Image (cartoon, coloured by chain):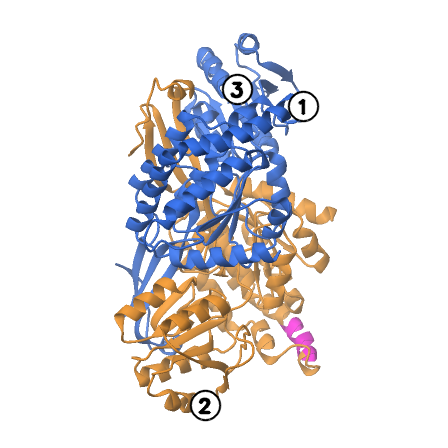
Chain colours: A blue, B orange
Amino acid sequence: MENIINIAKNAKNAYLKMMNLSSNLKNQALIEIAKKLEEKKLEIFEANKKDLELAQGLLEKNEINQATFNRLKLDENKMRDMISGLYDLVELEDVVNKTVWEKELDEGLVLKKITTPIGVIGVIFEARPDCLVQISSLIIKSGNAVILKGGRECENTNRKIFEVINCALNEVQNFPKNVVNLIFSREDVKNLLDLDEYINLIIPRGSNALVKFIQENTKIPVLGHASGICHIFVDESADKNCACEIIKDAKTQYPSACNAVETLLIHQNFEFKNELIEYLKAQEIEIIENPQNFDKEYGDKILAVKIVENIDCAIEHINKFGSGHTDSILSNNQENIEKFMNYVDSSSVFANCSTRFSDGFRYGFGAEVGISTNKTHARGPVGLEGLTIYKYKLFGSNNTVAPYAKGEKKFTHKFL
Amino acid sequence: MENIINIAKNAKNAYLKMMNLSSNLKNQALIEIAKKLEEKKLEIFEANKKDLELAQGLLEKNEINQATFNRLKLDENKMRDMISGLYDLVELEDVVNKTVWEKELDEGLVLKKITTPIGVIGVIFEARPDCLVQISSLIIKSGNAVILKGGRECENTNRKIFEVINCALNEVQNFPKNVVNLIFSREDVKNLLDLDEYINLIIPRGSNALVKFIQENTKIPVLGHASGICHIFVDESADKNCACEIIKDAKTQYPSACNAVETLLIHQNFEFKNELIEYLKAQEIEIIENPQNFDKEYGDKILAVKIVENIDCAIEHINKFGSGHTDSILSNNQENIEKFMNYVDSSSVFANCSTRFSDGFRYGFGAEVGISTNKTHARGPVGLEGLTIYKYKLFGSNNTVAPYAKGEKKFTHKFL
């Protein structure tokens, strides 16, 4: 416990410096990391090889599946993406210390709303070693500090990348120490969840079980989504071919993604219901009509199907069984499209396109912290902005409240 | 438990309708409440009299203090303020269903970020019956639904006002049922805190003990502040007279307010230290030099004082002992003012004015949900905007992700 408290305290001190670091210095840090990754990539591949050897054993014993194994693997392509992602982030505008608005409360009394970073972010991620670089760089760009815990399956790779990142940061003059921190044991994670005094936000990236465990075991705000029960509603007026193509894409293009469709709701008067189902079956999608559980995330080429009486029933079903992630209507009726998008209470509501577009890169955020189904702070794909909050700065000229309370003075409240 | 679950379910259904209610209908509801309050004010005063009689007994037995007793009392003045507050709110622009931005992801694929209400808000407040009207009206204007629990000391008044509000809402055609809900027992509050399936945000308004209890007993996001340890730092260059006036205002104008100053930090080289202290003592302020606890909120005419070596020590002290509420620097040194405002990590940072300005009405928000010391969602005085979030609407023309994943198509990401 003492160890993790020290890490958290140091991270908080790092944040207090990061909070006002110049864009220039933050970008220099990102460029330095990119350079060092390039320079040390053979060492990183070497470390990754160790993890893969161990993972191979787990794969053979069926303790992990092929998808997890693939995510563990760092190759030249992933390394290139990681590095180019860093340069992309350099190009993005700084998100903190921006004036949102400026308002004169009265003569000589000016209020400014200014964006700021949040503080110390705890990020718990599974497998994927590229996550470490991605999250660390977002944290740096947004002026926060981070405590990361990666999956055990890529501990060697994570240690190496962590070493490379901090080696890079050390070379940037005046860059604060302890901005990027890595912890390893499950015990440390459990302790981390208690440190609401130092940690301001937890972002879990991994299985539903991981997210649920974290949500249930901390008072710190958690940003993320436990499940992705996404729906497509095929309205009466939907075009048959478009429905076939979009549903195929939403289910098969990456079936284990959280934005893949899980439930298909079909209007009872949709003419081509049988052809649509036959087409999907031909794409090797297993169709389960009227399953007992409509709140199950298959994460595989399995699709629950329900016939609904009308659009209102579809909306009601989604608001009841959905996870507030992403839901799409296929329709040629403008009124129904509008109704669906207004009344489905999800973070992303789509018309006539695949649920798979629900993603920070596709939304043009440049980078993604994760997808949130929260109803506060940040919702949907979360980019750099989700790592910021704001503060109020009030510039006075020796003003007291008493004369306003007595009615001797009045506020002007003029936006500047 | 069953009762409270039903209330929560009904509130959620009400929210699903409120979410898209026209500004016109919401404003009609506010006007109707204002009218009914005027119409039924004698009945409300009558109910309030009952509470005051009971409170008189508690006051005599020292179970409540005079300040609480005064807050319980509803008179013509408070009634007039409540009613005019409703008309003020009608004049404010609607905060939901606004387009934040619109972006073309590619030809025929347009993403819109739209403001929305949050959902069902639980509000637990102590004493002050005017709170019921204020919160209900903010909830209506922002398109949410609410479950309120008021203090036991004003149960009769609350019941009556609740009846008047719902009587008014019933008269507005097409206004959803169950938008404003009231619960009474502590048991109900405990149960409410478990209903994270239905309740999206809890706002406690009351004592530090109440806020802490709630923060520690729910997984639902809590918006508020447990304590208000506000500081004033008197820099070396501060003007003596201004320091006297501002500190007097910040400590005595309303000593029990959360934005009243609790700790005075004085630069060791500030010439007029002794005169300042003498002046404050003459204002009947009790001065405690170097107390053991710098994290105590006195809420009275008591002021902790510490001499600090320099501005960095002042900033460090505030970031360590402060509650992130409101802190002010008195200085004529621009560089120090900037440093203080940048490095003090509080929701409101002031220069050369009283901490008492930290308030939604004074900030020009028209109305206030409360003051938040959170680092996520909403911070500082929270107005209507704090009761909103956003959703993404993606308007497609039969788009699938596959061609982008394969590199056959590229996103344009053009703001419209």
Q: CA distance from mark 3 to mark 2?
A: 73 Å
Looking at numbered disc 3 in the image, what kind of residue is underneath it?
Answer: Lys
Quadrant location of the N terminus of chain A?
Answer: bottom right
Which is nearer the eye, B157 or A372? A372
Rendered position, A306 above or below A170: above
Q: Does residue B212 lie above or below A295 as drawn?
A: below
Main secondary structure type of the part rendered in magenta:
helix
Mark 2 residue crowding within 10 angstroms, few (<14) / some (14–19) / many (20+): some
Taking the spot 41% from the left edge, 69% from the top edge, the residue there is B315
What SS does tag 1 mark?
Answer: loop
Quickly name the residue at label 2: B281
Tell me the number on the disc at residue B317: none
Q: Which residue is label 3 attached to?
A: A251
Residues drawn in magenta = B49-58
B86 or B290: nearer the eye? B290
Question: Up-down: is A380 above or below A218?
Answer: above
- Find disc 1 in the rendering and name its residue: A61
Q: Residue at x 48, y 55 (%)?
A: A11
| Quarter that holds the C terminus of chain A | bottom left
Q: Where residue B44 sits in the image (x, y, percent)?
A: 59, 66
Residue B243, x across and y down, in percent: 35, 82
- B90 on left or right of A205: left
Disc 3: which chain?
A: A
Q: Amino acid at mark 1?
A: Lys
Tell me which label, 1 or 3, sits earlier in the chain.
1
Percent position of residue B87, x then y: 42, 59
Query: Element under label 3?
Result: helix
Residue A25 placement (x, y as % from top left): 31, 50
**Foreground pick, A357 / A198:** A198
Output the chain of dot 2: B
Please say whether residue A345 is visible from this viewpoint: no
